[in-house]
Image (spheres, rainbow, N blue to C red):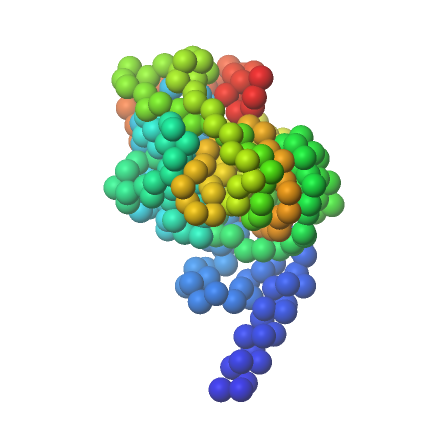
Amino acid sequence: MKKRALAIVLSVFMAACMTACGDSSSASESKKDETPKADRETIYQVSLLQGLTLGDYNGSVSVKELKQKGDTGIGTFEGVNGELIMVDGTVYRAKSDGSIETAPDDETIPFANVTFFDTDEKQDISGVSSIADLKKLLDEKVEKLGRNQFYMVRVDGTFKKMHARSELKQEKPYKPLAEALKTDQREFSWDNIEGTVVALYCPQYMEDLNAAGWHLHFVSKDKKYGGHVLELDVDKAELKIDCTQGFNMQLPDTEMFPTLDLTKDQSEDIKKVETKD
Ligand SMILES: [Zn+2]
């Protein structure tokens, strides 16, 4: 019995000491042991962001299936029916009024990125007063750890300000995302709110499959509010970084996907839909 306790303490200590990318297999939670290392160190992506941007909002992977690919991530739902935030294995939807609900297992997903979160590095942060400053701080981490890998990040703490958006569910025929958001994006602000930001970093070479750089979603600690982060002000938080070297993309089996024109550069449209203008 004593030996076992020591082993657990040691494994926790080792996990805390690991800083090298992806090397955190000695995780302490029992659920983690059930998943092979290769799966834990993979960013799983449903479709291309460029497919979503062109208007393929048809879901191809269920919430239940997504949960088998990770416990942490971001995305959206069939018909862009809200922003998806996955934290600690639960998939939440930030609805068009900024409120949160748990997504049903049979709902389908047109686009998402998830991974099993292992903390490779952590740091207490405070007084990071804008999304630009947070991205700058995260970029410095990435520069140190290597900019050609994927990173999933959690920022758990208190935010002086959180400005997020979600959108109204779209009806068929689907319009391109930039067009839909022109009228159907809804924005919200909360002051002094506790919660978790989940952020994904994609390397520059991913810009034809996703958006290079950072993409942030938020869910409040009480699981009442959330959305796609447009601006924030971090009061005090713990930053945790999961470095990931695998990438697994599932092409959607939707009717639209095979004939989408994915040849043109959509980086301007993507910038428009991902950031605040
Ligand atoms: Zn988003």
- Asked if residue 49 lies left or right of residue 192, the reply is left
- Asked if residue 218 lies left or right of residue 101, the reply is right
Quadrant of the rendered structure where residue 104 is? top left
Total number of numbered discs in the rendering: 0
Q: Which residue corresponds to the image point at 62% horizontal and 55% vertical from the top-left?
A: 120
Residue 249 can be seen in this image: no
Residue 38 x, y percent position in the rendering: 49, 55
Depth check: 95 or 58 in front? Answer: 95
Q: What residue occupies the far front of the structure in this picture?
A: 191
Q: Which residue corresponds to the image point at 28% horizontal and 19% vertical from the top-left?
A: 171
Q: Which residue corresponds to the image point at 51% horizontal and 34% vertical from the top-left?
A: 190
Quadrant of the rendered structure where residue 83 is? top left
Residue 17 x, y percent position in the rendering: 67, 63
Depth check: 271 or 219 in front? Answer: 219
Depth check: 239 or 236 in front? Answer: 236
Quadrant of image for the C terminus: top right
Residue 33 x, y percent position in the rendering: 45, 65
Residue 15 can be seen in this image: yes
Q: Which residue corresponds to the image point at 56% horizontal and 21% vertical from the top-left?
A: 276
16 above or below 229? below
Depth check: 233 or 29 in front? Answer: 233
Residue 15 x, y percent position in the rendering: 61, 64
Quadrant of the rendered structure where residue 180 is? top left
